[in-house]
């Protein structure tokens, strides 16, 4: 079995790649720079599976097609796709630059569309497939992140629509929506805003009393990607330490 994980050089994507390898998948680790994927590929191989680093801009249509073709040639046809690639640009909407907002929408939405479109024929040919996209609790609204929230909400609509469209082909489509999760990206935000204040504010609102970890999110992706989850589709699972969504 072959899985593709985008944005997998670090953070949640890297944790998902490791977990899928532990679950028995060969894993293609996709990110903008092939070289940055080395640690994740090493973790996949340590789990006893084959790993492949692929550098790709998920908003570039020809590059996406070439990346999926490379994965298919080296690891075999993908039957699991995790759309995790994403970027964040914090700004009040009145100050947000069109280029920044457009880039956020492109990476999350265009990227998921192009990757799914490229991988779907391989899943259809196999008669089975799993598509998991990374939404966020921000889909419910998050000040100073209008474009990010819009993109993450859009992924939920994308998920529910494709679940209906691709279900007859044996392909399930689901989304995971993390709450506050400690990653390199959230650490960078915290450094700009003040680490202690941000962490305390976020964690206070979480019923279980702690921040999430990339492994928490990988656990949810693992469930959706499992062969035994074939009757679960069109769902959005909030992995947020409490009842959200």
Image (spheres, rainbow, N blue to C red):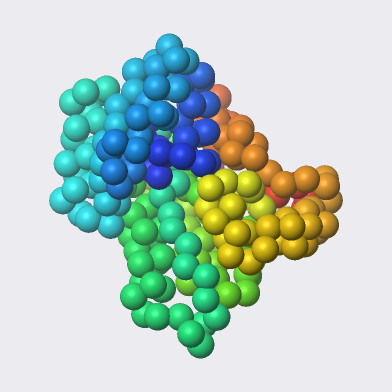
Q: Residue furthest top?
A: 48
Where residue 236 sits in the image (x, y, percent)?
59, 50
User: Looking at the image, can residue 222 be seen?
Assistant: yes
Which of 136 and 204 lies nearest the eye of the viewer?
Answer: 204
> Is residue 105 left or right of 147 when viewed as pictured?
left
Q: Can you say whether 145 is above or below 226 in the image?
A: below
Which of 6 and 110 lies nearest the eye of the viewer?
Answer: 6
Where residue 167 sits in the image (x, y, percent)?
43, 42
Q: Residue at x 17, y 41 (%)?
A: 66
Quadrant assignment, res 223: top right
> Is residue 85 left or right of 241 when viewed as pictured?
left
Q: Quadrant of the C terminus?
A: bottom right
User: Looking at the image, can residue 245 be seen?
Assistant: no
> Is residue 220 left or right of 68 when viewed as pictured?
right
Where residue 59 sits in the image (x, y, percent)?
28, 57
> Is residue 47 left or right of 76 when viewed as pictured?
right
Q: Quadrant of the N terminus?
A: top left
Quadrant assignment, res 3: top left
Q: Residue at x 26, y 46 (%)?
A: 56
Q: Residue at x 53, y 48 (%)?
A: 184
Which of 82 and 194 lies nearest the eye of the viewer?
Answer: 194
Where residue 78 sits in the image (x, y, percent)?
32, 30
Q: Residue at x 19, y 32 (%)?
A: 70
Q: Residue furthest bottom?
A: 94
Q: Can you say whether 17 is above or below 157 in the image?
A: above
């Amino acid at each position: 079995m072959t899985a593709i994980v985008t944005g997998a050089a670090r953070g949640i994507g890297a944790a998902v790649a490791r977990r899928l390898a532990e679950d028995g998948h060969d894993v293609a680790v996709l990110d903008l720079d092939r070289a940055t994927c080395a640690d994740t590929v090493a973790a996949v191989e340590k789990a006893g599976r084959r790993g492949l680093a692929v550098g790709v801009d998920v908003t570039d249509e020809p590059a996406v097609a070439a990346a999926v073709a490379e994965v298919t040639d080296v690891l075999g046809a993908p039957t699991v796709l995790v759309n995790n690639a994403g970027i964040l640009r914090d700004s009040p909407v009145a100050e947000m630059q069109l280029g920044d907002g457009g880039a956020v929408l492109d990476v999350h939405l265009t990227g998921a569309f192009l990757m799914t479109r490229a991988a779907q024929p391989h899943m259809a040919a196999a008669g089975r497939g799993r598509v998991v996209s990374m939404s966020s609790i921000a889909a419910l609204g998050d000040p100073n992140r209008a474009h990010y929230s819009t993109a993450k909400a859009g992924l939920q609509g994308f998920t529910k629509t494709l679940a209906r469209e691709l279900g007859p082909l044996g392909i399930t489509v689901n989304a995971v929506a993390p709450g506050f999760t400690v990653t390199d990206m959230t650490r960078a935000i915290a450094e700009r805003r003040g680490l202690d204040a941000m962490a305390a504010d976020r964690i206070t609102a979480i019923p279980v009393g702690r921040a999430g970890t990339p492994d928490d999110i990988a656990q949810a992706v693992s469930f959706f990607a499992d062969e035994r989850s074939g009757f679960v589709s069109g769902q959005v699972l909030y992995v947020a330490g409490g009842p959200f969504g």
